[in-house]
Image (cartoon, rainbow, N blue to C red):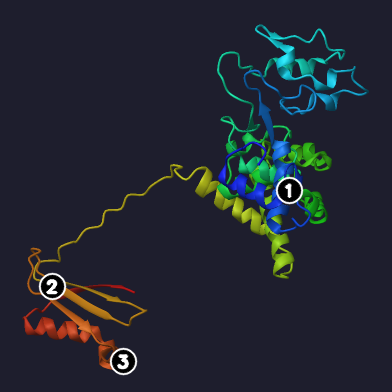
Amino acid sequence: MENSKNGGWADVLRTKYMVGPSRKPKAHTRAWKAVQIGRDICGKGSKWMVGCNSFLSFWNDKWLNIGTIRSFNEGPLNRGEGEVCIKDVTMNNGWDLANLSFTFPNHILKAMRATPLRRFAMREDHRNWISSLNGDFDSRNAYLLAIDENLEAPDFHGKWIWKLQTLPKIKLFLWKCLHMSLQVKDILTQGAKIFWEHSSCPNNLKHSFSDDLVSWIKINAFESAKATGKDYDWCNFFLLDLWNLWLQRNRKAFRQQPSNPNLVQAMEMQKCEFMYCVLDPNKRTDRLLKQVKWLKPAEGWHKLNTDGSFVCTSGLSGCGGLPRDCAGQWVVGFAKTISRLAQKDKSFAKPRNRKARLCIEISIGHQHQSMVAFV
């Protein structure tokens, strides 16, 4: 509404809620309240871009990222200085501040020198969003302004998390901890302290529990020593310890489940599994080669090989087989689907009789039988 003179929505809102520069007395709708809230947020997140021959107020308009210059000046200005425009204190080579009575500190001078001035391009003063590279509205930044989030917070220094040798879900968990999304140490203070005091922590790390959260996690996560009296690394056990304590706390808080009295033993088992399956899954082990092949029977004998399978879920089953002579030559074969009723027949429980009858029918006297079944 302030920046657009001929915009469609701006004209509608201006006509409905405004009388000149002031608000209509009955403008109390939700839309107008949203406009007022949005105006405050836009005032924080935007600034004026200086146009050619700018008529912006040098003191009272926000054309610097850091705010208005008047907000840094205490006391009254000299007569006539309050009406100074930006075009009055600029020249071809930059800024001309000699006629002003105010002595500007270095951070304001640096902000002024970093502000681009239009000398040849003919464009009017216009609004830009400060955090956006192209000046367009940034909804994420506006949301942070709406919830009074500290936009000048220090950069995140937890990139070392992704270098840890642990499970991806634990890395994400630590990332949230270091962003203070999860107040782990505050929530787990009592349980974690008791566990910490009775754990196999190396003696040189006992004092680290009193450190801040980031230092506590980082020191223990990169510790190369073994756990006291154990054969595994403390760093991996610590990370699994932290993760399982958090899960136990959530189960107790949201499902009313009691604490696991054997938590240490459970985590030691997880540590062994993690060490052999995750850290070194391709570890070379001694292999024993065993040849498996079909052996011919003695002369005058036949070998009968049978196979069968049974599916528990459907109850379907079947069997098959074939005899071979002493030269390995195929003699005859058979296959049969077995119904559910036949499975209940006690005669079916005597497969050797069926094989024997088959051998008699094809005149096989001596036979070796080999049977394999899959369930």
Residue bearing mark 2: 323
Quarter of image, res 47: top right
Q: Amino acid at mark 2?
A: Pro
In what element is the residue under mark 1? helix
How far apart are the alpha carbons under marks 1 and 2? 92 Å
Rendered location of residue 77, percent (x, y): 89, 20
Quarter of image, res 231: top right
Q: Comparing marks 1 and 3, which lies closer to the viewer?
A: 1
Rendered location of residue 316, percent (x, y): 29, 81
Residue bearing mark 3: 344
Q: Is residue 234 above or below residue 93?
A: below
Tell me the crowding category of disc 3: few under 14, some 14 to 19, or many 20 or more residues within 10 angstroms, Cα based: few
Residue at (60%, 13%) from the top-left corner?
A: 119
Q: Comparing marks 2 and 3, which lies closer to the viewer?
A: 3
Residue bearing mark 1: 36
How far apart are the alpha carbons under marks 1 and 3? 81 Å
Residue at (25%, 57%) from the top-left corner?
A: 292
In what element is the residue under mark 2? strand
Q: Is residue 343 visible?
A: yes
Relative depth, front residue between 217 and 278: 217
61 displayed left or right of 355: right
